[in-house]
Image: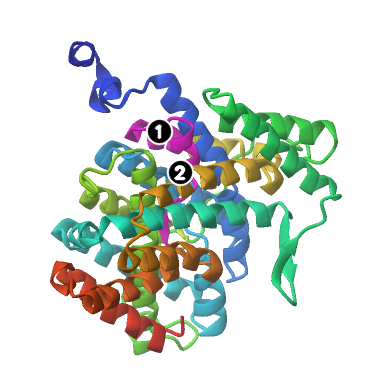
């Protein structure tokens, strides 16, 4: 293998294809798979932010630019097969809590996103964020990975209408006779068969087959056009006014209210990103001795993307759990993220084609990824309750609270308590005790 590696040239050598047992074709398929799994953000993020008063069309461009920059930095600088884009949940917090609930103008809210990104970058470059991630015990890291798998599978089932709301039991089985739901079930079965047969790129092939079947039966709309000119990001630079003292609608950025907003952006994005990075790296077999190599670089990537995204006019950018779909398709290096960035760039000009990638089409990919990531549960020491209970609460907590960060918080509060009871408190890293108090404060004053 060393001889083969020495013969590599260009990008193959830079990304160490031989070392990771991958190829241009494998990484390309993985990058495309990741893009297809997260392409919905180009439609959903602008839709959510438009309710905050932002222009829908221009926000499509801002969303794509944030995804392109973040994925390129992650790919070339951190060399992880993880793509980035404006985060779901964080965009909802931006629109419904900050702008809608607190009455803060979207320009001022963007300034908050920008400042949180700058603080993130400073923490990443200082090594503090990397130290925190590496202080997390191996069992909890596996639980985070498995929990993300359960969470992403639930998102896929929910989006496809297979699992729906219920007033009495919270959730129930959806209408399996609904054509769109049947299409999603068809995709899940087809993809499961392909994976059972160990066909390379099974998830990507499953997405294609499902999309084609949807178009044949009229369940997926044919695009009205193919090419469109990217709209100008009208929110470009709008964050600067509030940051330098401009008061909009009687609201100043320099207030206690905005301090709380910035800290919330910091808190949620940190643990969402940390959880996603650990989970996807574990799935790809990239953790070494339970630690995340180049963690500082990976964390810097989402910081830079958040800064750029805020400048162009979108909410916080973060690492995407949908990257696990590309990893499942064979992605092992940063070239996967570079390919994903390339498709986000093309999407700026071919955005009408995104209409064929709906929740019914992507459901199978998310469910299969959930299966793969949930397999990390086998690595947890289930016969040791001080390890098993926090891990279980972390994984299940993500699903039941519908939040990666809150699931992490619940498990991380339990872990040091049970270790102290057992008499192993000295084996717990001091950072875990700090996080214990931080999470307790979050639950009490953060109204989690």
Residue drawn where x is 35% and y is 60% of the image: 383
The vertical placement of 340 against 22, above or below, is below
Which range is magenta? 316-341
Could you tell me if residue 32 is visible in this image?
A: yes
- Quadrant including the N terminus: top left
Residue assigned mark 2:
323
Disc 2 residue crowd, few under 14, some 14–19, many 20+, Cα 10 Å: many
Give how far across and how far down residue 297 sits, in percent. Answer: 23, 48
Can residue 337 be found in the magenta stretch?
yes
Which residue is depicted at the point 48% across and 61% down? Answer: 235
Along the line of sight, which residue is nearer the eye, 30 or 196?
196
Total labels: the figure holds 2
- Residue 441 in the image: above or below residue 89: below
Q: Earlier in the sequence, mark 2 or mark 1?
A: 2
Between the C-alphas of marks 2 and 1, the distance is 9 Å
The secondary element bearing badge 1 is classed as helix
Question: Which residue occupies 20% across, 61% down?
Answer: 135
Residue 26 in the image: x percent, y percent?
44, 23
Where is residue 218? Give x, y as percent.
85, 38
Q: Is residue 86 visible?
A: no
**Nearer-the-camera pick, 24 or 370:** 370
Residue 68 position (above or below residue 119): above
Q: Quadrant of residue 122?
A: bottom left
Location of mark 1 (residue):
336
* Labels 2 & 1 near each other (Cβ < 8 A): yes
Image position, residue 429 (x, y; %) = 16, 67
Pick the front one: 168 or 178? 168
The crowding category of the residue bearing disc 1, from other C-alpha atoms within 10 Å (few below 14, some 14 to 19, many at least 20), is many
């Amino acid at each position: 293998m060393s001889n083969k590696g020495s013969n590599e040239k260009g990008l193959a050598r830079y990304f160490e294809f031989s070392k990771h047992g991958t190829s241009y074709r494998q990484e390309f398929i993985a990058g495309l798979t990741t893009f297809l799994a997260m392409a919905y953000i180009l439609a959903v993020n602008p839709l959510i932010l438009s309710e905050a008063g932002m222009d829908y069309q221009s926000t499509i461009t801002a969303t794509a630019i944030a995804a392109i920059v973040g994925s390129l930095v992650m790919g070339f600088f951190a060399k992880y097969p993880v793509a980035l884009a404006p985060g779901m949940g964080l965009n909802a917090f931006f629109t419904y809590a900050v702008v809608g609930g607190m009455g803060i103008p979207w320009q001022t809210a963007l300034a908050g996103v920008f400042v949180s990104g700058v603080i993130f970058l400073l923490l990443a470059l200082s090594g503090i964020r990397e130290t925190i991630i590496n202080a997390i015990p191996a069992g909890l890291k596996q639980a985070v990975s498995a929990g993300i798998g359960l969470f992403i599978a639930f998102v896929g089932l929910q989006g496809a209408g297979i699992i729906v709301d219920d007033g009495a039991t919270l959730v129930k089985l959806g209408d399996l006779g609904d054509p769109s739901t049947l299409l999603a079930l068809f995709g899940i079965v087809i993809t499961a068969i392909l994976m059972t047969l160990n066909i390379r790129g099974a998830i990507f092939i499953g997405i294609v087959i499902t999309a084609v079947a949807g178009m044949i039966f009229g369940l997926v709309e044919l695009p009205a056009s193919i090419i469109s000119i990217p709209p100008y990001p009208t929110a470009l630079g709008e964050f600067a006014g509030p940051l330098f003292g401009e008061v909009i609608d009687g609201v100043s950025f320099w207030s206690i209210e905005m301090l709380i907003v910035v800290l919330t952006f910091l808190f949620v994005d940190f643990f969402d990103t940390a959880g996603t990075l650990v989970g996807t790296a574990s799935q790809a077999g990239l953790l070494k001795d339970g630690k995340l190599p180049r963690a500082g670089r990976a964390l810097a990537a989402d910081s830079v993307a958040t800064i750029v995204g805020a400048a162009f006019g979108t909410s916080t950018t973060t690492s995407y759990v949908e990257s696990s779909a590309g990893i499942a398709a064979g992605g092992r290096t940063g070239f996967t993220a570079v390919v994903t960035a390339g498709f986000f760039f093309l999407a700026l000009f071919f955005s009408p084609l995104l209409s064929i990638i709906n929740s019914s089409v992507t459901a199978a990919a998310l469910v299969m990824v959930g299966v793969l990531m949930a397999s990390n549960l086998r690595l947890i020491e289930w016969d040791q309750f001080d390890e098993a209970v926090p891990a279980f609460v972390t994984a299940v907590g993500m699903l039941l609270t519908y939040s990666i960060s809150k699931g992490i918080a619940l498990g991380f509060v339990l872990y040091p308590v049970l270790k102290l009871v057992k008499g192993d408190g000295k084996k717990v890293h001091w950072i875990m005790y700090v996080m214990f108090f931080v999470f307790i404060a979050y639950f009490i004053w953060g109204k989690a």
